[in-house]
Image (cartoon, rainbow, N blue to C red):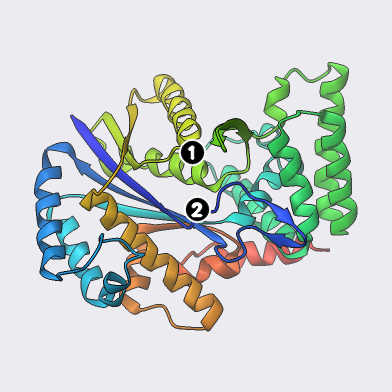
């Protein structure tokens, strides 16, 4: 039995870059990716109903969030699209990730609280506390580390040089800059582990000390990339398919055409499949859709609206509509600092993460 997952992205600005005190994503600080999960036999009927809904509006141009006419009718269309999706036994889910937080979470994962120093099994209370610690460290670093230093880490990880001496230097610099006894203690443990690896006392593959690189094609050249919200969101959304539809083991992702990011997404699929062979036997595949596709465009439209509601709330202090806020509680995962995260979703862990972050600041 096959499950189709239609995906589209919002606010992709390419590889993170920092020049002249300016991030290339300053105007689009969040990356969004949406996924619509539907049993393959239901796809045609869903597409027909969506087309009928859109045709009634007599919109000029393609139905996407970038279409001004479509944006102006979102209050009417958003709940109708929800209802059509539900009626066809489909599930729609979105992920929004702060592009700056993407850098921070990699700093935590490889410089402060690396996975190879976490030993508790998943679904234990100890593992949950480790996850809360990581969120607290990330929030503290997000608040205190300068953009120029964030870029220094980003540039190093993206270079994929796997230079342990440079990694230790950056970890030491982080420890000194943060001026936190708790972060200094955590950083010293990581440096000690790396030194043990260098001396041969710790047996771990060198590549495991660094983020996993992906391949992208930029200006017709093949490049390596490690700090990437797109691949992160893509992998997470696909991993949710068995949770939403456990009876389907053949999972096909249909993504809008992505010349630059296609190699990275295929590498993500390969990693997921390698894990599935060991764990649960699910098989994932990836196809790309070019041109008009009403289901992909519906995902784009809904993702664009959610992203815009968040930006309007942050930049213009506009309230998020009640129906969008309620929708986000069960249809959205947000990866960002807790001050941003709590604007869109309720999370009982946020007060604890905030307290831990404040405590770790000392």
Which quadrant is home to the C terminus?
Answer: bottom right
Query: How many numbered badges does the structure rendering display?
Result: 2
- Determine the image quadrant of residue 116: top right
Of residues 25 and 326, which is closer to you in this image? Answer: 25
Q: Position of residue 299 (x, y in %)?
A: 30, 55
Rendered-image quadrant of the N terminus: top left
**10 Å neighbourhood of mark 2: few (<14), some, or many (≥20)?**
some
Q: Nearer the viewer, residue 317 or 243?
A: 317
Q: Nearer the viewer, residue 302 or 68?
A: 68
Task: Residue at 41% x, 78% y: name it.
Answer: 320
Callout 1: helix, strand or loop? loop
Q: Is residue 90 visible?
A: yes
Residue at position x 23%, y 48% in the image: 293
**Mark seen at residue 334:** none
Please state the horizontal and vertical placement of residue 230, each as a whole percent of the image: 50, 45
Label 2 element class = loop
Question: At which x and y percent is residue 53?
Answer: 13, 64
Q: Is residue 213 visible?
A: no
The x and y percentages for residue 70 are: 27, 70
Residue at 64% across / 33% down in the picture? 119
The residue at which mark 1 appears reads as 261
Q: Mark 2 highlights which residue?
A: 12
Point out the tag, 1 or 2, that comes first from the N-terminus.
Answer: 2
Task: State left or right for residue 340 relative to residue 303.
Answer: right
Do tag 1 and tag 2 residues touch (Cβ < 8 Å)?
Answer: yes
In the displayed structure image, the side of residue 201 where residue 95 appears, left or right: left
Left or right of residue 265: residue 227: right
The reply, left or right, for residue 257 in relation to residue 118 is left
Q: Residue at x 88, y 48 (%)?
A: 173
């Amino acid at each position: 039995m096959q499950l189709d997952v239609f995906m589209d992205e919002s606010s992709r600005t390419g590889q993170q870059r920092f020049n002249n005190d300016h991030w290339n994503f300053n105007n689009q600080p969040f990356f969004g990716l949406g996924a619509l999960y539907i049993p393959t036999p239901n796809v045609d009927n869903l597409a027909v109903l969506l087309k009928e809904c859109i045709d009634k509006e007599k919109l000029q141009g393609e139905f996407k969030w970038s279409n001004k006419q479509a944006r102006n009718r979102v209050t009417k269309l958003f709940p109708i699209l929800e209802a059509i999706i539900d009626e066809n036994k489909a599930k729609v889910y979105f992920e929004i990730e702060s592009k700056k937080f993407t850098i921070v979470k990699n700093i935590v994962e490889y410089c402060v609280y690396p996975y190879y120093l976490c030993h508790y099994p998943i679904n234990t209370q100890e593992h949950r506390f480790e996850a809360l610690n990581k969120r607290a460290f990330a929030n503290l670093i997000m608040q205190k580390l300068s953009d120029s230093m964030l870029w220094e880490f980003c540039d190093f990880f993206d270079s994929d040089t796997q230079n342990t001496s440079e990694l230790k230097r950056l970890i030491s610099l982080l420890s000194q800059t943060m001026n936190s006894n708790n972060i200094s203690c955590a950083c010293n443990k990581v440096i000690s582990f790396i030194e043990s690896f260098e001396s041969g006392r710790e047996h771990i593959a060198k590549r495991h000390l660094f983020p996993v690189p992906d391949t992208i094609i930029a200006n017709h050249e093949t490049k390596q990339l490690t700090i990437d919200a797109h691949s992160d969101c893509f992998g997470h959304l696909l991993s949710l398919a068995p949770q939403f539809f456990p009876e389907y083991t053949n999972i096909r992702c249909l993504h809008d055409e992505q010349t630059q990011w296609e190699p990275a997404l295929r590498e993500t699929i390969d990693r997921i499949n390698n894990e599935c062979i060991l764990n649960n036997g699910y098989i994932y595949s990836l196809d790309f859709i070019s041109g008009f596709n009403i289901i992909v465009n519906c995902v784009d439209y809904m993702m664009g609206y959610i992203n815009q509601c968040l930006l309007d709330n942050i930049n213009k202090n506009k309230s998020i509509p009640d129906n969008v806020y309620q929708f986000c509680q069960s249809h959205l995962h947000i990866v960002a600092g807790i001050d941003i995260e709590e604007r869109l979703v309720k999370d009982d862990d946020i007060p604890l993460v905030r307290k831990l972050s404040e405590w770790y600041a000392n």
